[in-house]
């Protein structure tokens, strides 16, 4: 049995907790971007996905992702191999240099946040029950298989892993394909299934709480160090490289986004700064261990500029991606994944390595995009036909928070203030 390295274990425990923190961070980021009548629903969609997906992960998700591939084909892990974490949920099991339980927890957070990311594309209009059914089925049919393709390396956890990681050789250090392209393609498909919000393109749908958006972006940036540097699965130089590249790319993307805004609209906005941060984080995720710091800056600059432009595509092509999951996560994930083929150290075209790695990156990105979009579109339409995916028009107009959860995000009425003031005067 391999010896446990306490330094690696400590870092991976922290990294798992940091990725968990990203989910409430995402909730705040999304929650601030919607109108006041939808804020609780956005938080609940993320928290609901977190709870459900982690349960499925423990039961069979880890085994589907990191179990030995059926028939050595590289498409799906053996569900029975680690069912209910068989043989791994003890103090003796080791993966690499850390306890197996720590690695399982860390990867489980990836599964949960990937599902939560999709929710931003259907803000204001999805039944909560239908969303939870979708979350469980999508994790099972899309995320677990795709994560097997990308994250399951031969002889790391089980004997044979996924085809993208081992046969194709496309590089994705922390989830540009498995997380962001995957979620972005799914968000696009669900936007088609549910249709446009009432008043889309005609009625202003401004964010109700921009400070909440910026708090969410800050928490995402903080937690993302666990996401990226934690993917080194140890406290080592690779983690350090991923860490500094995450710093550099994210800062560059923030600047690029607000520069585009200033040139295009005359103003650099707080929403743009927060969105630029997330775009940079998304783009550097697959590339953070494949590029040097100058490459990371380039990735961030390109992602910030392109994502700032891409968020307007929904108005041009007529799909209602409410919170720009497509414009940020799909486009940002594609930018980071493809740019590895250009600026990857020793593998990129700009380093004289030819186009071989670029072709691999394109195939990997395209396969995940096509699979996720197709399966999500079919899954969403089946759910819509069987139980209905969208709330009624009256419920949408009055607000999904009341319709789905019988609560309001803020109870700040005149009577409330009057009661407080009156009691203060009485005291």
Image (cartoon, helix red, strand yellow):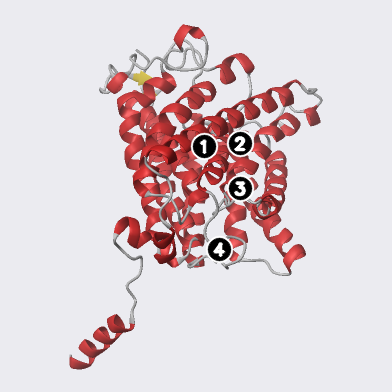
The residue where tag 2 is placed is 288
Residue at image coords 57%, 38%: 185
Residue at image coords 43%, 53%: 27
* For marks 3 and 4 on the same chain, the one whose residue lies earlier in the sequence: 4
Please tell me how crowded label 3 is: few (under 14), some (14-19), or many (20+) other residues with Cα within 10 Å.
Answer: many
Residue 93 picture location, percent across and down: 31, 19
Asked if the residues shown at circle 2 and circle 3 are in contact, with their CB atoms under 8 angstroms apart, the answer is: no
Residue 412 picture location, percent across and down: 34, 76
Residue 137 makes an appearance in the image = yes
Residue 233 makes an appearance in the image = no
The residue where tag 1 is placed is 229
Q: Give the side of residue 249 with respect to residue 66, left or right.
A: right
The residue where tag 3 is placed is 328
Instruction: For marks 1 and 2, give the CA distance.
Output: 8 Å
Depth check, mark 4 against mark 2: the one in front is 4
**Quarter the N terminus occupies:** top left
The residue where tag 4 is placed is 199
Q: Is residue 392 above or below residue 85?
A: below
Instruction: For marks 3 and 1, give the CA distance.
Output: 21 Å
Depth check, mark 2 against mark 3: the one in front is 3
Q: Give the side of residue 312 with respect to residue 166, left or right.
A: right
**Quarter the C terminus occupies:** bottom left
Residue 133 picture location, percent across and down: 36, 38
In front of the other: 194 or 167: 194
* For marks 2 and 3 on the same chain, the one whose residue lies earlier in the sequence: 2
- Asked where in the image residue 60 lies, by quadrant, the reply is top left
Tell me the element at label 1: helix
Tell me the element at label 4: loop
């Amino acid at each position: 049995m391999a010896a446990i390295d306490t330094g690696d274990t400590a870092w991976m425990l922290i990294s798992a907790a940091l990725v968990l923190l990203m989910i409430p961070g995402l909730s705040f980021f999304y929650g601030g971007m919607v109108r006041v009548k939808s804020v609780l629903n956005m938080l609940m969609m993320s928290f609901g996905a977190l709870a459900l997906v982690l349960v499925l992960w423990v039961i069979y998700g880890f085994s589907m992702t990191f179990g030995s591939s059926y028939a050595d084909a590289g498409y799906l892990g053996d569900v029975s191999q680690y069912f209910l974490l068989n043989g791994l949920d003890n103090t003796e099991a080791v993966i690499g240099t850390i306890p197996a339980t720590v690695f399982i927890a860390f990867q489980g957070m990836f599964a949960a946040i990937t599902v939560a990311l999709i929710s931003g594309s259907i803000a204001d209009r999805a039944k909560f029950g239908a969303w939870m059914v979708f979350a469980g089925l999508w994790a099972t049919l899309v995320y677990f298989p795709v994560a097997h393709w990308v994250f399951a390396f031969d002889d790391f956890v089980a004997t044979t892993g996924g085809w993208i990681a081992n046969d194709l050789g496309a590089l994705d250090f922390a989830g540009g394909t498995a997380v962001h392209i995957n979620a972005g393609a799914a968000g696009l498909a669900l936007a088609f299934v549910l249709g446009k919000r009432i008043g889309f393109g005609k009625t202003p749908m401004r964010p109700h709480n921009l400070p909440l958006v910026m708090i969410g972006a800050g928490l995402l940036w903080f937690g993302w160090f666990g996401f990226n540097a934690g993917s080194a699965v140890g406290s080592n130089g690779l983690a350090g490289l991923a860490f500094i590249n995450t710093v550099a790319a994210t800062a560059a993307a923030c600047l690029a986004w607000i520069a585009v805004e200033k040139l295009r609209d005359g103003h650099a906005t707080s929403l743009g700064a927060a969105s630029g941060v997330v775009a940079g984080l998304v783009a550097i995720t697959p590339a953070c261990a494949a590029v040097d710091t100058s490459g990371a800056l380039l990735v961030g600059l390109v992602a910030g500029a392109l994502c700032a432009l891409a968020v307007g595509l929904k108005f041009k092509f007529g799909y209602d991606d409410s919170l720009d999951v497509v414009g940020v996560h799909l486009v940002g994930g594609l930018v980071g994944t493809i740019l590895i083929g250009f600026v990857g150290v020793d593998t990129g075209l700009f380093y004289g390595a030819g186009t071989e790695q670029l072709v691999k990156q394109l195939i990997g990105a395209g396969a995940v995009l096509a699979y996720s979009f197709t399966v999500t579109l079919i899954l969403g339409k089946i759910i819509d036909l069987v139980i209905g995916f969208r709330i009624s028009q009256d419920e949408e107009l009055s607000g999904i928070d009341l319709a789905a959860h019988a609560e309001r995000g803020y109870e700040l009425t005149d009577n409330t203030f009057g009661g407080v003031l009156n009691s203060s005067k009485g005291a």
